[in-house]
């Protein structure tokens, strides 16, 4: 696909204005976010991938007054037979399965990679919908093919339909509605009620979704991390050489509580430990991401390949950095600061091509740093 080399996709609005006025705050409709957009994929490409195990997909239809949902993988016969009702199929993590998605997601680089979740693509026949609902995360809804009407609400309180198999708002009040045509886009912050209804038999919508770890998840994972990284001497014991006689031997005295508090307060983490946790936590791959290690490769051959090919991150790989420390799929990368520039390039462009004039020592060092990523299946060569 040829998605123009635009820097972003916000139309007339600058990134600064978007972040200041809209991001996590209020919805905005952007007409012609991409002019003359032609979707590089159609429903057939979706139907192809949702037959595979490991692709997360759902088929949703409204039948006999009930919202019905079926989970993939699907057989071709499930989909091509004419359903006698409007239906929608939603496919998650399309960026893990179809290569066009990467250049599309590049248009959203004004939001940090650490916040990006996935590209979901939905296909609907005329009147197909997943009903009025709200999501807990930010989303850009980009119309790729056909037309979809979006209704949004301004409600703060929702009642949910308890009988429904999917999350449906039962008291949805429409505040605004628009019909989106190919190239139009609607941004929604979390918890805004919305209801999309296909207006054509070929409605394809791309949803760029963001992730936000829960506070509970951050705290409990951090406690696990701290536990795994305790530097306490295991032989140190509770001591009370100045014990004095107490009235009731069953009582835990304030003196004992004081000692326990002092011990708890000895738990300390420095910036470096906190950074390591953050880098590992934010690059943890999604559960369904499986990496297939290639046949082994000797360092010398790997270095030759580095000079003539580009090394590209697997679409499922998460790679981020803090200053000159690099993290990939929940692990730290061992590297000298000297090579941070190269690794930054790999993290932000998601690929790296080395200059063939690179001196031998640097090539060797980079080979040693990058080979483990290749051997774990986190990155692969492209021509
Ligand atoms: Mn939604």
Image (tube, grey):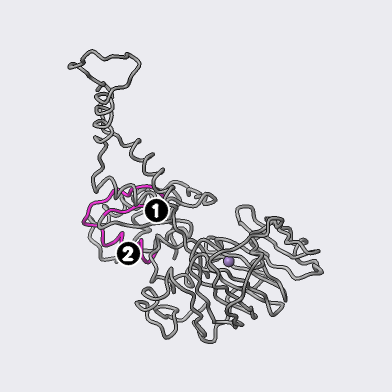
As drawn, the residue found furthest toward the front would be: 247
Q: Range of the magenta residues?
A: 325-350
Q: Is residue 375 above or below residue 147?
A: above
Tell me the residue that label 2 is attached to.
345
Write the residue at 28% across / 22% down.
Answer: 253
Residue 238 found in image quarter? top left
Measured as percent of width and height from the top left, residue 16 is found at 34, 77
Question: In the figure, is residue 114 to the left or right of 363?
Answer: right
Q: Is mark 2 within 8 Å of ligand 1?
A: no
Count of numbered labels shown in the rendering: 2
Measured as percent of width and height from the top left, residue 111 is found at 39, 68
In this view, the residue in front, 308 or 324, is 324
Residue 199 found in image quarter? bottom right
Q: Is residue 200 above or below residue 311?
A: below
In three-dimensional space, the C-alpha distance between marks 2 and 1, rounded to whole angstroms, equals: 19 Å
Tell me the residue that label 1 is attached to.
282
Q: Quadrant of the C terminus?
A: bottom left
As drawn, the residue found furthest toward the left would be: 242
């Amino acid at each position: 696909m040829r998605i123009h080399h635009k820097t972003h996709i916000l139309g007339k609005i600058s990134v600064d204005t978007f972040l200041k006025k809209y991001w996590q705050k209020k919805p905005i409709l952007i007409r012609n976010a991409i002019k003359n957009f032609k979707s590089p994929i159609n429903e057939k490409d979706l139907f192809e991938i949702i037959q595979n195990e490991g692709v997360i997909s759902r088929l949703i239809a409204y039948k006999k007054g009930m919202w019905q949902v079926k989970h993939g993988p699907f057989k071709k016969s499930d989909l091509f037979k004419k359903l006698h009702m409007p239906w929608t199929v939603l496919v998650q993590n399309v960026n893990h399965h179809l290569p066009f998605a990467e250049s599309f997601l590049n248009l959203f680089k004004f939001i940090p990679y650490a916040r990006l979740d996935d590209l979901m693509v939905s296909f609907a026949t005329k009147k197909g919908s997943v009903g009025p609902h709200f999501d807990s995360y930010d989303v850009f809804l980009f119309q790729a093919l056909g037309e979809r009407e979006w209704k949004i609400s301004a409600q703060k309180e929702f009642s949910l339909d308890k009988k429904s198999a999917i999350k449906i708002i039962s008291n949805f009040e429409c505040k605004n509605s628009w019909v989106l045509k190919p190239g139009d886009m609607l941004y929604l912050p979390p918890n805004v009620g919305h209801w999309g209804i296909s207006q054509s038999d070929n409605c394809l919508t791309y949803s760029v979704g963001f992730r936000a770890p829960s506070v509970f998840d951050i705290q409990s994972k951090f406690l696990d991390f701290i536990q795994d990284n305790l530097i306490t001497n295991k032989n140190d014991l509770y001591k009370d050489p100045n014990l004095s006689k107490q009235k009731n031997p069953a009582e835990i005295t304030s003196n004992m509580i004081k000692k326990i508090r002092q011990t708890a307060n000895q738990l300390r983490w420095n910036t470096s430990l906190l950074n390591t946790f953050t880098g590992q936590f934010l690059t943890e791959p999604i559960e369904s991401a499986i990496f297939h290690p290639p046949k082994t490769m000797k360092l010398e051959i790997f270095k030759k390949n580095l000079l003539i090919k580009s090394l590209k991150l697997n679409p499922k790989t998460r790679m981020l950095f803090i200053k000159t420390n690099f993290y990939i799929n929940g692990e730290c990368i061992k590297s000298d600061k000297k090579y941070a520039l190269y690794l930054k390039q790999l993290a932000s462009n998601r690929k790296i091509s080395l200059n063939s004039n690179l001196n031998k020592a640097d090539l060797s060092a980079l080979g040693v740093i990058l080979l483990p990523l290749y051997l774990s299946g986190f990155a692969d060569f492209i021509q």
